[in-house]
Amino acid sequence: MKLLQSAALILFFHVCNAQYDDSGRRGLYFPKTVYSGVILPEYEKSLHLLPEPVLTDDPRLIELYNITWQIAFDHFRNPGPGSPFVSDYIDEAFAPQIFQWDTFFMLMFSRYGFHLFPSIGSLDNFYRMQYENGYICREISETDGSDFVFGGREHTVNPPLFSWIEWQYYLISGDDSRFSTILAPLEKYAGWLEQYRKKEGTVHGLYWQTGLGSGMDNTPRSGSGWTDMSSQMVMMYDHLAMICNKLGERGKAEQYAARARATGEKINRYMWNDEDGLYYDVDDEGKQIRCKTIACFWPMLAGIADEKMASAMIRNLKDPRTFWRPTPFPSLAADHKMYKADGDYWLGSVWAPTNVMVFKGIDRYPEVAGSAEFNSEAVLRYLEVMSYVFRKTGTLWENYAPESCMRGIPSRPGFVGWSGCGPVQLLIENILGFRPDAPENRLQWNIQRIDRHGIRNLRFGKVIVTAIAEKRSDLTKPIEIAVDSNVPFNLEIVSGSKQEIYQIKEGENRLVFNNHQQ
């Protein structure tokens, strides 16, 4: 009996360790093996080539936007001598490693400067260091490409968002040439996650994480089915399907789309709580662990929730007892016993990646009454806190306190890692309302302001456009719009419940959008 127990124990440890076995053969599925890069751009010389927001009633947000880019340019990197990295990259600049979780969200704002610095190449270095079995460590040394392990290997898997961010970058750049080279490493990584991020014997068959692995380091969560990880797997498969469709791989696309649907159905079956209007983590038996954290909202971004569910989740976000705090949105609900007013990392702090997740999740449900207006209000409040703290301290911070206009404690200064998302991405997309779609040669403009506002020099695909809406006295008045473009494209204007598509010609265009319902 003891021999059988010992053999079982040896087998258990072998299986556990096998997932991290390194054959020494790295990057087998990614074709780029030799560094190629460019001279890094300089901020002062590139300033005139960046998008230039126009926002007459909120000049402080323009100030915040500019300082964000200025700091960001200091984070562009060439690989150092002896590094196995194959591409230039954007760096969070607080440790000598690259981080998956940070990199994904740095790309969400830096893609608006894709023509100056192709920051999507940052992901190449993760693909290059991928294990033969598909594993990719969440932290990798910039000097020699070795894995950096903190607290144990089980914590070294970050949110699997590679395919999602590749697609988001494509929507701006319009360049699909990467897809044929990244499909193999992404598929191999998906296979590894399927094998090693599902706990055997659970009722639910969903995916597990750890606090460090999820990016929410000291979050008070548990269970074998994590809402965020499971939703992120849906996102991974959905975007793998989209990439495969783009490559003409219809069979694969259908398989990945089916996996996404099946996982989404399990999430709704086991994790949705109709009474609370939230999704929760679950234990082995599928019992919900009712801990209200910002992770409860990932199913919105994954498109798993229906309209009724999304409406209930947005009501939670509006609730001042939980998530609608002076700085939206805290990482832990304010009525939780462990909630900290100064943040204490993931016990309340407000973080860029989870705020982007929430705002972009709400964007997916325009049919929910008042969702667009609430999103704009929340984004503006978040950016106003960032702006106030910047004017007090002269910099941006890693996270912010939920109960006052101050940095979170603890929080690193000079942090245009993911904190750049607010002043750049959210300003362009949610305050000004621009949503570029380079593959469709289309720009959606959701106009909710009455001051003179717009953007100059916005680039998506081959388009370089300036679009300005003139000041008006109230929301019911017609909108006079000037558009100047280097090439033709379709401009979809949305205001209130009305929308109209205009075929923009090369050169100057003058439009009047009448949003008054007859």
Image (spheres, rainbow, N blue to C red):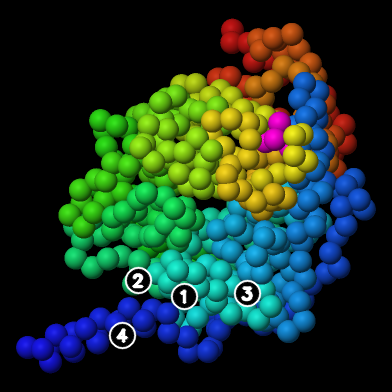
Q: Are marks 1 and 2 in contact (CB under 8 Å)?
A: yes
Q: Earlier in the sequence, mark 4 or mark 2?
A: 4
Is any part of residue 123 visible from this angle?
yes
Judged by its main secondary structure, the magenta piece is helix
Name the residue type under label 3: Ser
Comparing labels 3 and 2, the label whose residue is closer to the camera: 3
Label 4, label 3: how many angstroms apart (C-alpha)?
26 Å
Nearest the eye: 305 or 243: 305
Q: For mark 1, give the secondary structure.
A: loop
Q: Is residue 75 left or right of residue 10?
A: right
Q: Earlier in the sequence, mark 4 or mark 1?
A: 4
Residue, x 28% and y 58% (percent of image)? 224
For residue 141, which numbered disc appears in the image? 3
Give how far across and how far down residue 499 sits, in percent: 61, 24
**Residue highlighted by disc 4:** 14
Q: Earlier in the sequence, mark 4 or mark 3?
A: 4
Label 4, label 1: how many angstroms apart (C-alpha)?
16 Å
Q: Earlier in the sequence, mark 1 or mark 2?
A: 1
Name the residue type under label 4: His
Residue, x 59% and y 7% (percent of image)? 518
Give the magenta-colored segment's residue range.
386-390
Nearest the eye: 506 or 515: 515
Q: Is residue 413 left or right of residue 464?
A: left
**Residue highlighted by disc 2:** 196
**Residue highlighted by disc 1:** 135
Give how far across and how far down residue 104 sits, in percent: 59, 57
